[in-house]
Amino acid sequence: MMATATQVAFQPRELRLLLVEDSLADAELAIAELRRGGFDVCSDVVQNKEELEAHLDRQAYDVVLADYNLPHFRGMETLDVIRAKGLTIPMILVSGALNSITAVECVKQGATDYVLKDHLSRLPLSVRRALEERSLREERTRNQKKLAEKLEELGRSNRDLEQFAYVASHDLQEPLRMVAAYTQLLAERYRGKLDENADKYIAYAVEGAVRMQALVEDLLAFSRVGRNGAVHKPTSSADAVVIALKNLTAAVQESGARVKYGELPQVNGDRTQLVQLFQNLIGNAIKFRGSASPEIEISADAAGAEWIFAVTDNGIGIAPEHRDLIFVIFQRLHTRAEYPGNGVGLPICKRIVEHHGGRIWVESEAGRGSTFRFTLPAVSADKEDGHATRT
Ligand code: ADP
């Protein structure tokens, strides 16, 4: 029969074996069986705990074979010694007789396998499996470590990018203000004094500068979410909605929007950010209205340790293929002529919700209104006295 790739991979040229065994004859038998099974065995035999510890300190072994019952040492204690040294060497119990319940118990406690002395022919297979398992375990640990390093790297590069976006948008404001101010001055002073083209060009420059200012301001607002200073404490979401609506008075009145909400809960969060969250969502519900005047409903349902909020509108809706795109910064589904905006409102909502440990998503169909849902942490019993956490 042909050997499989795994069999070949786990067949060591040399097997460094440590036997915990008081009978040299039994040790010889086990070694002979392993040699017959294809292992090039290099072994040491110890009979008690002290010798075991000394050998483990001195040498790296691939496998330990331990007799279940030694006169002064229990086979399973071998495992304690191996673990106490922080080692992961597989240990196989070898025993004259071991009832199946005890055997299962030993495996549960960490023995890799057990082999009866009158079935020693099974030993090579058992050792091969133990080595294979160990190698897989080590590979898993290596992969987990690599993944943790990658995550750390990703986190670092994200932080760098955020820092860059913040610094760039912050530092761009001043020169932009100059450009905007002086192009506006040009427009005022020289309108009608140069030729027609000049008026047009100056108007384009003014428009561009003003738009860029708005973009930079929005980018800065986005970068600011979660940059130290947010205080998470029991906060009334109803109050946040009331303030958001107050800030939106003009839009509500002009559109004739009706906003309904029942009882809304206390959540653990930052008040300023929650106001901004509701304001962006309600503002969008008004902005992206259809031909009917906006009907908006805000509600919250308890779900374990969090609340699921819903902001529902009867507006133009969102096609399913755009449900993720709209949360990406500067992504818009319409031209500025159709609906004003920079595509930063929802990304800000997402950042706010995620900084609160929640998720946000939309359920909608084009032309059938939208429901934006997001989760926020409920106030836990130990926070009810008003303890705040800074983020
Ligand atoms: P902006 O409002 O500046 O365009 P947002 O990030 O707030 O940016 O929204 C991104 C896009 O998501 C919008 O351009 C719009 O196409 C879509 N959108 C957001 N809210 C709604 C809504 N309530 N109804 C329909 N479309 C919406």
Image (cartoon, rainbow, N blue to C red):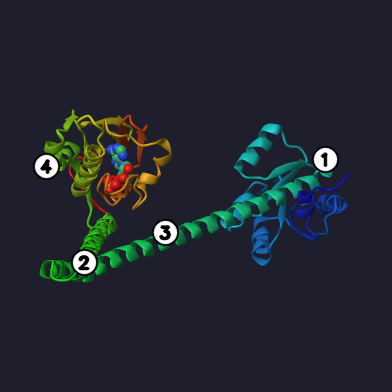
- Residue, disc 2: 202
Q: Amino acid at mark 1?
A: His
Mark 1, other Cα within 10 Å: few <14 / some 14–19 / many ≥20: few
Along the line of sight, which residue is nearer the eye, 312 or 180? 180
Q: Amino acid at mark 2?
A: Ile
Q: Is residue 370 left or right of residue 261?
A: right
The x and y percentages for residue 152 are: 45, 60
Element type at mark 2: helix
The CA distance from mark 3 to mark 4 is 41 Å
Along the line of sight, which residue is nearer the eye, 43 or 288? 288
Q: Is residue 44 left or right of residue 158?
A: right
- Residue, disc 3: 155
Residue at the spot 52% in from the left edge and 55% down from the top edge: 147
Residue at the spot 14% in from the left edge and 39% down from the top edge: 245
The x and y percentages for residue 133 are: 68, 48
Marks 3 and 4 in Cβ contact (< 8 Å): no
The x and y percentages for residue 141 are: 58, 54
Marks 3 and 2 in Cβ contact (< 8 Å): no
Q: Nearer the viewer, mark 3 or mark 4?
A: 4
Q: Nearer the viewer, mark 3 or mark 1?
A: 3
Element type at mark 1: helix
Question: Which quadrant would residue 168 be assigned to in this image?
Answer: bottom left
- Residue, disc 1: 119
Marks 2 and 1 in Cβ contact (< 8 Å): no
